[in-house]
Amino acid sequence: MDHGPSNPIIGTILGLACLAGGFALWQYVGKPMRARAAASVKWPVTDGEITRSQLNREEPKRDKKAMFSMTVAYAYTLDGKNLEGHRVWFGDHFSTSDPDHFQAAVKRYPVGTAVKVFYDPADPSDSVLEPGSNWSASIWYLVGIGLMVFGATALASSALVIMILGAALASAVGGSRERESDFDRPKPMTLDRTDSRPRSDHDDDDGIEIV
């Protein structure tokens, strides 16, 4: 069912909100995560051990599907400090209705498995087992771009609607003023063309001669 054109003001507000939110998500979440994921392949490596590995199942609410996530923890020691990491790959902290991806990771890292831990030299407590960029590390980057594109499209559509409405309003106002001007303008006098011959002094003579 067609509800007619959307409100341009609402479209403008929505477009600005999506542009601002998308830019913030892209700039402050997506880009740093991708950069850290790409840089992690050059991080130093140390030995570690898996201390916890399990698939988590969240009970579904009403008619929704069950959601799954994973918990993988590993211990490692640096400069005499015992540290613990919880990241298998960048962007792995999410839930999904398809458990296969997490089940595979849990099987790869059973408790007691010796692992290589990549850690950030600037912050050794920040670590990962599988370095490098992947689709989950880029998800917020792509979502931010998508929001910005949607916002720009909404703004462009709203601007077009506003231009069309403005042109229609200007045309209506101009036509109204022109009609008022025509109504107020004095009408020119017209000549009676029923008798266009020159009139003389004898034209008023009724045919009676006075002696």
Image (cartoon, rainbow, N blue to C red):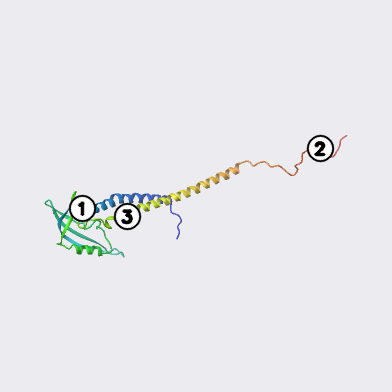
As measured in the structure, the alpha-carbon distance from the residue carrying label 2 to the one carrying label 1 is 123 Å
Circles 3, 1 touching at the beta carbon (< 8 Å)? no
> The residue tagged with tag 3: helix, strand or loop?
helix
Question: Residue furthest toward the left?
Answer: 80
Kind of residue at disc 2: His
Residue tagged by mark 3? Answer: 143
Closer to the N terminus: mark 3 or mark 1? 1
The C terminus is located in which quarter? top right
Spatial separation of the CA atoms under disc 3 and disc 1 = 27 Å
Camera-side residue of 48 and 163:
48
Q: Kindly state the secondary structure of the residue where label 1 is placed.
A: helix
Question: Spatial distance from mark 2 to mark 3, Cα to Cα?
Answer: 101 Å
Q: Give the amino acid type for the residue marked by disc 3 in the picture.
A: Val
In the rendered image, the vertical position of residue 205 relative to residue 109, given as above or below: above
User: Of circles 2 and 3, which is in front?
Assistant: 3
Q: Secondary structure at mark 2?
A: helix
Q: What's the mark number on residue 110?
A: none
Q: Position of residue 38 (x, y in %)?
A: 24, 53
Q: Is residue 58 visible?
A: no
Between disc 2 and disc 1, the foreground one is: 1
- Give me the residue at 22% from left, 61% from top: 70
Q: Residue at x 35, y 53 (%)?
A: 147
* Residue 145 visible, this angle: yes
Q: Which residue is mark 2?
A: 202
Front position in the image: 3 or 166:
166
Residue 42, labelled with which disc? 1
Residue 210 vertical position relative to residue 88 in the rendered view, above or below: above
